[in-house]
Amino acid sequence: MRVTLRVKRSDATESAPARWDQFEVEAEPTDRVLDCLHAIQWYQDGTLAFRRSCGHGICGSDAMLINGRNRLACKVLVKEVDQPITVEPMRGYPVIKDLIVDMEGFFEKYRSIKPYLISPATPPLREHRQDPKERDRFEDTTKCILCGACTTSCPSFWANDQYVGPAAIVQAHRFIFDSRDQGQTTRLNILAKESGVFRCRTIFNCTEACPRGINVTKAITQVKKAILTHLFRRGAPPS
């Protein structure tokens, strides 16, 4: 079948405004949008720029706006979307070229919440043990692949780029509720700040956009409750 794609093109090194280029490719209904982009890049226009790596919905590198929704190009099938298929870079981040955006601001916020296990200064004599119930508290948020789809779908992020964003909060949740971690208070203090979790307005865009099916809004709500419990009771409201 013939598939029509409209791709938004731009280049940060040039002064020309963004433009829409239209392409037609041969594809099967079960082919992915990523396959169509490959067909364009390999056989029609080698200058088309986009990120991809694993091609199986694990790395998160090919997140983009497909027919107006944040999706992974490697997971969206041609038969699932109307034509022409519009493909744009994710919103809210500077565009480097075509579908590639600068993610440094995204990862700076990710690093700010200390996304690693904080252990006691003295290493334990045996492994950290954790029962299934303790693991279940943060199982959902371990699925995050840092694609950025949730953050760039968030109106609070669009309104204020200082907001730490859903993805960083999801990563913080993963450690805040990990019974082995010793950095809960540190992370709660970080997320209690003006740019932190309380900028969330519970719109649910993030949950809808997540390609891994994470209940992002639920995780954010649980972090809010943890801050209220651990900080308000100690007389330390959000700054």
Image: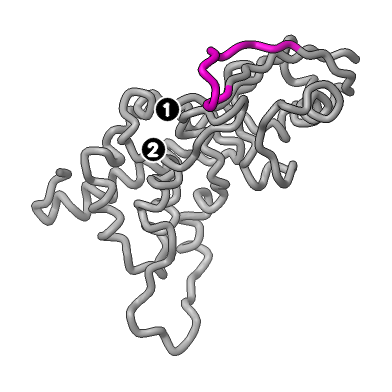
Identify the mark at residue 165; answer none if there is no mark: 2
Q: CA distance from mark 1 to mark 2?
A: 8 Å
Give the structural element (helix, strand or loop) at label 1. Answer: loop
State the residue lying farthest toward the left: 235
Residue 31: x and y in percent read 83, 28
Residue at image position (34%, 27%) is 156
Magenta region: 11-22
Q: Tell which of 213 and 146 is nearer to you.
A: 146
On screen, 193 above or below 88?
A: below
Three-letter residue code for mark 2: Gly
Residue at image position (21%, 38%) is 194
According to the image, label 1 marks what residue? Answer: 154
Locate the N terminus by quadrant.
Answer: top right
Q: How is the image coloured?
A: one colour
Q: Is 19 inside the magenta-drawn segment?
A: yes
Q: How many marks on residues?
A: 2
Q: Is residue 97 left or right of residue 112?
A: right
Residue 18: x and y in percent read 56, 14
